[in-house]
Image (spheres, rainbow, N blue to C red):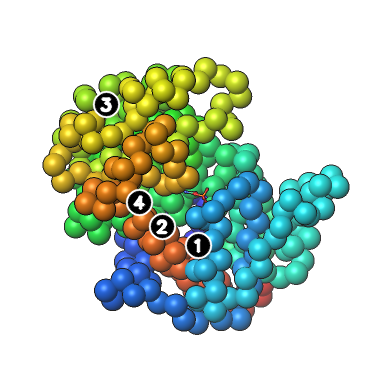
Amino acid sequence: ARHLLGIEHLKPDDIRCILDLSEHYVGLNRQPVKHADALEGLTQINMFFEASTRTQASFELAGKRLGADVMNMAMQASSLKKGETLIDTALTLNAMHPDLLVVRHPQSGAVDLLAQKVHCAVLNAGDGRHEHPTQALLDALTIRRAKGRLQRLTVAICGDIAHSRVARSNILLLGKMENRVRLIGPPTLIPARAAEFGVEVYDDMKEGLAGADVVMMLRLQKERMDGAFIPSEREYYHRFGLDADKLAFAKDDAIVMHPGPMNRGVEIDGTLADDINRSVIQEQVEMGVAVRMAAMDLLARNLRATLSQGAGHV
Ligand code: CP
């Protein structure tokens, strides 16, 4: 493929291919590959129109470890402030011949739109409530390493599903890989058409977590709630916050995940989040660099193949 815009467009074999190459970049004994030449001579521009710690840092590190020239656009200081549109900004950067554009944007669909206007490979680093494909891929790699497989698992995704692109990409990926996905949360935070995605829906942690292999917690995305009903944090934590007592409803060896950023004491107990016997939250961050290296490596191979076929700048 030319771009990585969403899990929606990937086949199970594509997912396996990205995860297998990611294992190479995780390195033997988890000593990561820090110098490679897969992106040598290529230019990567990161455009983050929304705050990020993990995704932006890991895409930057991934590009540098693969030998790319990496530029982070300071979008807050760009001419967007003077009224330039997203598309004009993209066309301006496109004229400088980047090879890879990594884009995060608050509007669902903005990254797809941008990808239609530029000549380089575009990677979706999260668009509105739509998709966050590299997050789902790094979650999949973390699960596969912890459980030894990525199929026939029961995965409970808990919390604010309605506003979460992480949930959407994970539901798509886990479904494609033949896992059972459960959504747990207050009805106001579960999308009305969730059942169409082939998932089971619960509003009770005890019922939803019963027999789960993986428990994935999500943050309350207040910035996307548009003044809609938000339960008080105390009440929310009481009913839906994950602590050791609620985790006991899941399988004894269930792992705890969170994409971050995490609000301790709101959706997850801080001590549980730090418990290295149950929580794989730091591994998720570690896998993020490897998965982004693999995704950009594969897109670059495609880019070079197209160029060598004489198609010019794709
Ligand atoms: N998980 C995730 O996307 O984190 P950031 O917002 O910090 O990039």
Along the viewing direction, whichever of 266 and 103 lies nearer the viewer: 266
Gap in angstroms between the C-alphas marked 3 and 2:
26 Å
Q: Disc 3 vs disc 4: Cβ atoms closer than 8 Å?
A: no
Q: Disc 1 vs disc 2: Cβ atoms closer than 8 Å?
A: yes
Q: Disc 4 vs disc 2: Cβ atoms closer than 8 Å?
A: yes
Which numbered disc flags the more N-terminal residue, 1 or 3?
A: 1
Which residue is disc 4 drawn over?
281
Front label number (1 vs 4): 4
Along the viewing direction, whichever of 32 and 305 lies nearer the viewer: 32
Q: Disc 1 vs disc 4: Cβ atoms closer than 8 Å?
A: no
Which numbered disc flags the more N-terminal residue, 3 or 2?
A: 3
Which residue is disc 2 drawn over?
285
Q: Residue at x 31, y 71 (%)?
A: 30
Would residue 83 be visible to someone looking at this image?
Answer: yes
Which residue is disc 1 drawn over?
58
Using the image, determine if residue 44 lies above or below residue 56.
below
- Residue 242 in the image, given as x and y percentages of width and height: 31, 34
How many numbered circles are shown? 4
Amino acid tagged 3: Met
Q: Disc 3 vs disc 2: Cβ atoms closer than 8 Å?
A: no
Which residue is disc 3 drawn over?
205
